[in-house]
Image (spheres, rainbow, N blue to C red):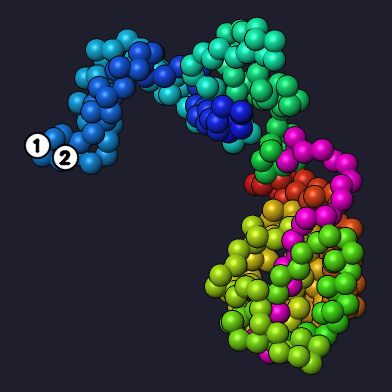
């Protein structure tokens, strides 16, 4: 957690448990030395998997307390959402009037002020692969600032790209052209260099993707991975240029559609971006996972 203040920028590191190996900072070098390999043999290299560390734990009650927490179920959180992010230490905070107060768990206090309540064990609905999506607001939001990737095949002639750019620009959406190599692509009869190549892009870069390839083309394995990741993460997808969802091995749903033109594909994705994710797909994938 990063705090930007008039006195400087401060980082607050958080743990998943409210205790730490030590309470006195002067003991920190002892903890580090205990976790290091033996100084004479450098064996073993697995840090705490040796007697030096466990000697420290058994002889230092605060470390013993910490290890009991780590070895409990709290040491294996279900997901990032289920990690509370304890700040471990107590902070003294002050308001604009100079009044101060001790805050034992600053991360939880800040989260509460932001409307992020601590997770409960019953919070995660069965219909999700992860409980994190269940915390997102299901409203409709502007698409401004989002990024759409247009993935083209190695021999694909891209038609209607300028129209698609105009549609995206009107909504404040950025479009990135992804091709098999860095060589220029035939775009509306002109040679245009791509923004990304198959080897240098990942699905995380895009909020939605358009797959534009010849129907008979055999998809590159890296494109298949990108499609699978985008689908699994509930991102909106569109298929155009005679290439269909079926060609990509994807079952069409409200967020994976085949369109007539590239401009139609971009317009469809911009509308879908308002809901952030394809919630019905996430629920379906989650139900399949829990059933298996």
Rendered position, 109 above or below 229 = above
Quick one: label 2, few (<14), some, or many (20+) residues within 10 Å? few
Prevalent SS, magenta region:
loop
Rendered position, 41 above or below 104 = below
Q: Quadrant of residue 96?
A: top right
Discs 2, 1 touching: Cβ within 8 Å? no
Provide residue 60's location: percent of width, then percent of height: 28, 12
Q: Which mark is residue 17?
A: none
Q: Is residue 19 shown left or right of residue 234?
A: left
Observer able to see residue 290: no
User: What residue sits 58% from the left and 82% below the top?
Assistant: 181
The residue lying furthest to the bottom in this view is 189
The quarter of the picture where the N terminus appears is: top right
Observer able to see residue 171: yes
Q: Which mark is residue 40?
A: 1
User: What residue sits 87% from the left and 50% below the top?
Assistant: 142
Q: Is residue 36 shown left or right of residue 69?
A: left
The answer to if 146 sits in the magenta stretch is yes
Discs 2/1, front = 1
The answer to if 20 sits in the magenta stretch is no
Q: Which mark is residue 43?
A: 2
Rendered position, 108 above or below 280 = above
Question: Between 188 and 209, which is closer to the camera in this rendering?
Answer: 188
User: What residue sits 84% from the left and 79% below the top?
Assistant: 162
Residue at disc 1, secondary structure: loop
Rendered position, 263 above or below 106 = below
Please report the bounds of the magenta region as a residue range: 133-155
């Amino acid at each position: 957690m990063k705090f930007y203040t008039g006195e400087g920028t401060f980082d607050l590191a958080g743990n998943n448990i409210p205790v730490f190996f030590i309470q006195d900072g002067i003991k920190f070098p002892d903890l580090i030395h205990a976790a290091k390999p033996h100084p004479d043999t450098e064996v073993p290299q697995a840090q705490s998997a040796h007697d030096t560390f466990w000697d420290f734990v058994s002889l230092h009650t605060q470390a013993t307390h910490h290890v009991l927490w780590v070895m409990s179920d709290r040491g294996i959180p279900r997901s990032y959402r289920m990690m509370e992010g304890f700040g471990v230490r107590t902070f003294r905070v002050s308001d604009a009037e100079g009044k101060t107060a001790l805050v034992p768990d600053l991360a939880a206090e800040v989260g509460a002020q932001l409307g992020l309540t601590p997770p409960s064990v019953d919070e995660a609905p069965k219909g999700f692969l992860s409980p994190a999506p269940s915390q997102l607001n299901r409203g409709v939001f502007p698409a401004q600032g989002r990024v759409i990737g247009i993935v083209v095949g190695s021999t694909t002639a891209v038609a209607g790209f300028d129209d698609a750019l105009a549609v995206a620009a009107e909504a404040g959406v950025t479009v990135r052209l992804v091709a098999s190599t860095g060589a220029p692509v035939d775009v509306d009869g002109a040679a245009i260099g791509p923004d990304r190549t198959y080897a240098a892009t990942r699905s995380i870069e895009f909020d939605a993707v358009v797959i534009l390839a010849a129907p008979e083309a055999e998809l590159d394995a890296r494109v298949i991975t990108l499609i699978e990741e985008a689908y699994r993460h509930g991102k909106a997808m569109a298929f155009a240029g005679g290439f269909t969802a079926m060609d990509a091995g994807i079952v069409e749903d409200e967020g994976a559609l085949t369109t007539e033109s590239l401009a139609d594909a971009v317009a469809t994705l911009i509308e879908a971006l308002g809901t952030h994710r394809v919630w019905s797909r996430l629920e379906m994938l989650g139900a399949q996972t829990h059933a298996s």
